[in-house]
Image (cartoon, rainbow, N blue to C red):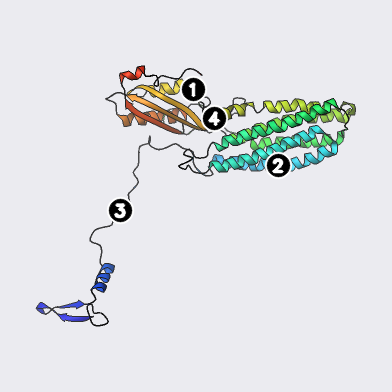
Amino acid sequence: MEPSPAKGGSETTRLVSPRGRDDAGGSLRLKSLFTEPSEPLPEEPKPVEMGSHHCHNLPQLGLTPERLQAQRQLCAACAVCCVFMAGEVVGGYLAHSLAIMTDAAHLLADVGSMIGSLFSLWLSTRPATRTMTFGWHRSETLGALASVISLWMVTGILLYLAFIRLLHSDYHIEGGAMLVTAGIAVCANMLMAFVLHQAGPHHSHGSRGAEYAPLEEGPGELPPLGNTSVRAAFVHVLGDLLQSLGVLAASILIYFKPQCKAADPISTFLFSICALGSTAPTLRDVLRVLMEGTPKNVRFEPVRDALLSVSGVRAIHELHLWSLTLTYHIASAHLAIDSTADPEAVLAEATSQLHSRFGFSSCTLQVEQYRPEMAKCLRCREPPQG
């Protein structure tokens, strides 16, 4: 740097290159480093708070409390099942009892179905993609279906073996070993049923499955229904418990009266049929979900009437109600409104009705102007009774 004279006696500073020449490029570089920009940088866009009707009432991704509880229940029940299954295999072999081996085979089916349910729970936590736009929630339903099918397959094989034993009586059963093993099996199934039982004010283990209760209007939470995979495993274990009780009764009879050894295949035959019947509620719910039927205990007419009661709505059409799981309900519809109605207000009220009164997780509503020709349109007519 060297000073240079300027007019008025003042001095200016100029940059000199190592060779003694002005370095204009260096001056520009230093200026760019130490000079503030003339225009401020654009600020980051701030999130805008949308109305309550815009927010999506969707299930959380990842390990939600409901999924975490289901995972813990299935892991604990699977561990108990593996331990007692090994004991039943040994006890059934020592006792030469087909009924005990039947119970062990059902426990094996339980283990396989629980592992499949755990995998489906993990898979359902994956986020939605452009290919799987709804995510992987329905894998939970497929896991429940696999549990039912596995029980049917194992029960069919054991029914065949029981029929063979009824035809040929050339077998011997150790009553003492059968009695001890059957007693342990009953305790094991009771323990697994206790682990898998989902206690809650809105949950039911009856034949109708999880119940739905409409909520009051206004902000509220969705009805906390039980996890499909845990419910399927619970019904599976109840069937095994029923069979274990039958095997215990048969073992007591054989222990005191060895000549009544036919009670072993007979109990296998009877209680296997009962186990198959116990899968009917779960299978019915699974088929309803896979066939995209109306969610359980949600009827078409109340939803239609609720949308028609919204101020400004003249007619509705293309109303569809379905579900991805027993707890993830979806609705879509076209709302024909008056020319004087506010579309945003209609959309907000209609969405609030579906969320708060019926517990729908996702709602897609199209608002359009009402036209008289809609009354004669074939596509705008309501579907017939199913």
Secondary structure beneath label 3: loop
Q: What label sits on residue 299 in the rendered view?
A: 1
Check disc 4 and report its element: helix, strand or loop: helix
Q: Earlier in the sequence, mark 1 or mark 2?
A: 2
Q: Position of residue 32 (x, y in %)?
A: 27, 67
Q: Amino acid at mark 3?
A: Glu
Q: Which residue is mark 4?
A: 289
Q: Earlier in the sequence, mark 2 or mark 4?
A: 2
Q: Nearer the viewer, mark 1 or mark 4?
A: 4
Left or right: 261, with 117 as reference point? right
User: Which mark identifies residue 43?
Assistant: 3
Label 2 with label 4: CB-CB less than 8 Å: no
Q: Residue at x 11, y 80 (%)?
A: 9
Residue in front for this viewpoint, 36 or 221: 36
Nearer the observer, disc 1 or disc 2?
1
- Residue 331 visible, this orientation: yes
Q: Quadrant of the rendered structure where residue 373 is?
A: top left
Q: Which residue is mark 2?
A: 80
